[in-house]
Image (tube, grey):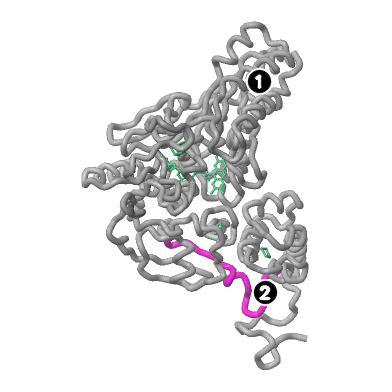
Amino acid sequence: MAADEHVSMIPAASKVGWSAEVNGRGFGDEIESGAILLDVLRDQVGTLGVKRGCDMGTCGCCTVIIDGVARLSCLTLAGEAEGCEITTVEGLATGHHLAPIQEMFSECGGSQCGFCTPGFLLTSAALLAKNDSPSDSEVKSAIDGNLCRCTGYQQIVESIQAAAEILRSDAKSKDGTAAQMDPHPGLGAGDAGE
Amino acid sequence: MRTPPFNLHLPTTVSEAVQISAELRAEGRETDWIAGGTDLLPNYKWHLNTKSDVISLARIEGITSVSMTEIGAMARLSEIADGGEAHPLIAAAARKVASSLIRNSATLGGNICLDTRCFWFNQGEDWRSSIDWCLKCDCGTGADCRVIVNQNELCVATYQADLAPNLMVLGAAIHLAGPEGERSLPICEFFKLDGMTRNVLREGEMVVKVTLPDEVGQWQGEYQKLRLRESWDFPEAGVAAAWRLGGDGTLAELKVATTALESIPRLHDQEVAPIIAAGWSGEESITALAKAIQQTVKPVNNTAFPPNYRKKMTRVMCERALAQLSIN
Ligand SMILES: Cc1cc2nc3c(=O)[nH]c(=O)nc-3n(C[C@H](O)[C@H](O)[C@H](O)COP(=O)(O)OP(=O)(O)OC[C@H]3O[C@@H](n4cnc5c(N)ncnc54)[C@H](O)[C@@H]3O)c2cc1C
Ligand code: SF4
Ligand code: FES
Ligand code: FES
């Protein structure tokens, strides 16, 4: 028997208008009524930093920040995020200044193959926005829904703690140069600092 | 795997939600409620009993409150766990559900109404087609249950949610709204065999909130959970216990409930009563009660751990949950 005989299908999903503020920019388009946020972000908004890992809620690779809360985009209906402020990994840096959490992941070895990294960065960013001096156990419970098959997690915890330290200081970033909207720092006209 | 296409509806009040559902069903369409979506969407992605129309409860106002005596159906588990308002036993149990990311979406209503689970069922469509389906999602084939074969009418999928036994031992009531109006019942009467029926919800009826008795603050408790990975796995067995001490510090009342062992969570008044009647003697009573509960639960082989191990651990967790009552 055909596998599709039983599925209570409708001929095609109805389309609805959808808009949200993704990484500080307004985005509007027509989406399928029952669309999943992960699909809309990857296929329509184009923020490919949102990774599809398990697509089932178990790995955390698809984490985005919706109105300040870290959520799994693979288990969120786009319709429910309508009109919300959504941050993906593309929205963390300011110009060529990486956010402290990104800088520290690269410095402390928090990222190896990198597939899990966007999810970890956003979960950590949401944690640090609420609590800039978490204990190691608070860090570990915040990232308990993010899986990493490479690092063994120790470096990730260290990266988050190092970022927390920067956030607690006044520096905000280790890079002393002014943030410029340059997608390729170092390749342009001598703006890479030092 | 993608969900099949469905239409999403976003009502803003309970009555609008109930009305939309009634109208759609009058047109011959099928509907599901969606709260946090952390159970429904994985099931939809596996093409398990999907519907043409899904009604989201996320925009409904006034059903998100959390207090000692009342929790709205749309209260997020992260708020219940860490907001500092819920009863400590409920908060501790919520903290043990899934991962922190899932708890940011997951709700009380969705947790109570969690679909039952089974390793023959929670699988992709190709996988299930390779075993010629099973009763719970038989795709029109009249397939038998794969766990208890040759009967073709009972699904014994396991109820693997954490909050229900804790709400049971604290004497919670559940409040529902549907096309025939509102009704309330003790949460112990909400669940209904079998793994496909799950609960007493009628067509188009939804959970609005859960209330706890005014004197719930006098009750203390403990929830023990067995799972594969501590970070986010479903319970393989769960034991909730709550008790009230009398003025002299002796045990006045005791309730024990279990989850993840059968198709519905179960309150164990029948096992507790004779032991209390015989006089509470601390450690000895605990051992006897733990044994009695171990003997009454009937897990089947459809989750990660073998039923015998889950049964043995039920006794161990019972003893751990009651350890604080070992003297007097
Ligand atoms: C990786 C992973 C790990 C998990 N681990 C656990 C765990 O350890 N313990 C645990 O208990 N759960 C676990 N879950 C399951 C789930 O996340 C939680 O049970 C959660 O609380 C479900 O709530 P929800 O709001 O997301 O439900 P939804 O998915 O929105 O709904 C679940 C079901 O309830 C129905 N429903 C929802 N709200 C209502 C309402 N108000 N009235 C009537 N029906 C309603 C829906 O129609 C659906 O059938 C896990 C899930 C995943 C993906
Ligand atoms: S218990 Fe039987 S009918 Fe129910 S889901 Fe499992 S195999 Fe299917
Ligand atoms: S892709 Fe969302 S949790 Fe794995
Ligand atoms: S860096 Fe490879 S999975 Fe985490």
Q: Which mark is residue A98?
A: 2
SS assignment at label 2: loop
Q: From the viewer's perspective, is residue B177 above or below residue A136?
A: above
Q: Position of residue B315 (x, y in %)?
A: 66, 24
Chain of the residue on which disc 1 is drawn: B
Q: From the viewer's perspective, is residue B295 above or below residue A136?
A: above
Based on the displayed image, in which of its 4 quarters is residue B81 positioned? top right
Q: Mark 1 = which residue?
A: B290
Residue at the bottom extreme, as displayed: A189
Q: From this viewpoint, is residue B286 visible?
A: yes
Judged left or right of residue B186, residue A4 is: left
Chain of the residue on which disc 2 is drawn: A
**Discs 1, 2 touching: Cβ within 8 Å:** no
Q: Amino acid at mark 2?
A: Leu
Q: CA distance from mark 1 to mark 2?
A: 56 Å
Residue at the top extreme, as displayed: B278
Residue found 43% across the figure and 59% down from its top: B2
Q: Main secondary structure of the magenta part?
A: loop
Judged left or right of residue B53, residue B161 is: right
Report the front residue among A88 and B229: B229
Instruction: State yes or no: residue B79 in magenta.
Output: no
Q: From this viewpoint, is residue B213 visible?
A: no
Q: Position of residue B8 (x, y in %)?
A: 35, 54
Residue found 73% across the figure and 58% down from its top: A153
Q: Amino acid at mark 1?
A: Ala
Instruction: State yes or no: residue A94 in magenta.
Output: yes
Residue found 76% across the figure and 51% down from its top: A135
Range of the magenta residues? A82-100
